[in-house]
Image (cartoon, helix red, strand yellow):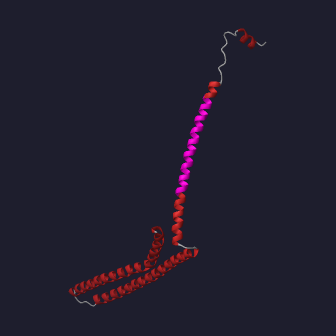
Amino acid sequence: MTAARKYSAGKAGTAKPAKPAKPVEAAVATGAEAVETVVKAGAQVAAKGYEKAVAMGREQVETAVKAGAGAFKGYGDLAGFGKDNVQAVMTSGAILAKGVQDLNDVWLGLARASVEDAVGAAKALFGCKTLPEVVELQTGLAQAQYEKFVAESRRLSDMSAKLAENASAPITARVTVAVEKFTKPLAA
């Protein structure tokens, strides 16, 4: 017999009995069951939420597909729609380029006229003999230049507004077609 056995055998009445492992095992089992219940409940809630999200997404996709199917009967319609949009942008660009060229021509004409007017005014001023003649001529020239400036500004403003309207017309028409094409199936 070893010393430890002798000791436990010698003091058999005083040795504490080992605690049974059953209460610990029961607590662990109860905790495991609680965790398992919580995990199952969470999984069920997550599964229901996922199913609901998938169903909502499916409904939205079906609605969009129906709207798209109503708007475009096939690839040919879609390609034609895109082609018409590109054509509208190209037409708009051509109108804009022509309009800007016309505006530049007007500006160039104004600059030429301004230089010619300045040369004519200088010749007229040099031809004046008295100070009152200079003041009278200068007043007349200033008034004429101001009136010309107002008239040309109005003309350039009108040209610019008309250019903007004309250049945006093809794109505006395509936007109108697109809105009608997409809202018609949704309204039905």
Q: In which quarter of the image is residue 27?
A: top right
Q: Give the range drawn in magenta.
A: 27-56
Image quadrant holding the N terminus, namely top right
Is 79 left, or right, of 174 in this rendering? Answer: right
Name of the residue lying farthest toward the front: 188
> In this view of the protein, which residue sits in the foreground, 117 or 106?
106
> In this view of the protein, which residue sits in the foreground, 165 or 184?
184
The location of residue 70, given as percent across then percent down, is 52, 71
Q: Which residue is drawn at 47% across and 67% down?
A: 186
> In this view of the protein, which residue sits in the foreground, 114 or 32?
32
Indicate whether residue 51 is drawn in magenta: yes
**Total numbered badges shown on the rendered structure:** 0
The location of residue 14, given as percent across then percent down, is 66, 10
The location of residue 87, given as percent across then percent down, is 51, 79
Q: Is 25 placed above or below 92 here?
A: above
The location of residue 84, given as percent across then percent down, is 52, 78
Q: Quadrant of residue 42?
A: top right
Is 72 left, or right, of 118 in this rendering? Answer: right
Q: Which residue is drawn at 55% across and 59% down?
A: 58
